[in-house]
């Protein structure tokens, strides 16, 4: 008799941008784990990026970090649901398939994000106003 594995739920908030467009890129992300633990990180990219590139790069870095954390905790991504929150309407609509990804650089980043998201049991992405996203970072 097979037992159904419990799906753990991780909430991810992220935001990215650039100082100028393009300009030096940066981002922040925050995880809220099922056990109540919270992890937050700010990153600065070593190249000039557009705002959209910085948003995608932040999401990719966050997902790669989450996969590492799960491995360190002995958890498996295929038993983890990821609920992503962002203020980027573009990324929400591109990842949901509502918008096409025409820009070649964004297409590469989009494909990498989809590949990483596909490693989890389930995922969803939700747009929230910037104020809501920032409130999770203590801004």
Image (cartoon, rainbow, N blue to C red):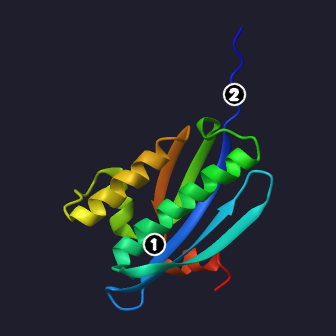
Position of the N terminus by quadrant: top right
Between marks 2 and 1 in the image, the one whose residue lies nearer the viewer: 2
In which quadrant of the rendered view does residue 89 lie? bottom left
User: Residue 41 in the image: x percent, y percent?
Assistant: 64, 73
90, 71: nearer the viewer: 71
N-terminal label among 2 and 1:
2
For residue 118, side relative to residue 35 (left or right): left
In which quadrant of the rendered view does residue 106 lie? bottom left
For residue 97, side relative to residue 92 (left or right): left
Q: Is residue 63 above or below residue 5?
A: below
- The residue wearing badge 2 is 5
User: Residue 40 in the image: x percent, y percent?
Assistant: 68, 71
For residue 127, side relative to residue 20 (left or right): right
Q: Is residue 16 above or below residue 76?
A: below
- The residue wearing badge 1 is 87
**Quick one: which residue is furthest to the left in this view?**
102
Gap in Å between the C-alphas at discs 2 and 1? Answer: 32 Å
Q: Is residue 42 above or below residue 5?
A: below
Residue count near mark 2 (Cα–Cα under 10 Å), binned few <14, some 14–19, many ≥20 = few
In which quadrant of the rendered view does residue 138 lie? bottom right
Q: Secondary structure at mark 2?
A: loop
For residue 123, side relative to residue 53 (left or right): right
Position of the C terminus by quadrant: bottom right
**Quick one: which residue is furthest to the top in this view?**
1
Q: Identify the residue shown where x is 61% and y is 58%.
A: 65
User: Residue 50 in the image: x percent, y percent?
Assistant: 33, 79
Residue count near mark 1 (Cα–Cα under 10 Å), binned few <14, some 14–19, many ≥20 = many
């Amino acid at each position: 008799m097979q037992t159904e594995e419990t799906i753990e739920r991780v909430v991810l908030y992220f935001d990215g941008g650039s100082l100028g467009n393009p300009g030096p890129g940066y981002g922040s992300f925050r995880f809220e784990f099922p056990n109540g633990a919270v992890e937050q990180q700010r990153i600065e990219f070593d190249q000039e990026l557009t705002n959209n590139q910085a948003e995608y790069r932040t999401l990719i870095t966050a997902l790669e970090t989450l996969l590492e954390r799960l491995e360190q905790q002995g958890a498996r991504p295929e038993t983890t649901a990821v609920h992503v929150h962002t203020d980027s309407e573009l990324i929400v609509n591109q990842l949901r398939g509502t918008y096409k990804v025409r820009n070649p650089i964004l297409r590469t980043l989009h494909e990498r994000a989809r590949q990483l998201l596909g490693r989890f049991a389930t995922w969803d992405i939700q747009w929230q106003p910037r104020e809501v996203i920032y409130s999770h970072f203590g801004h």
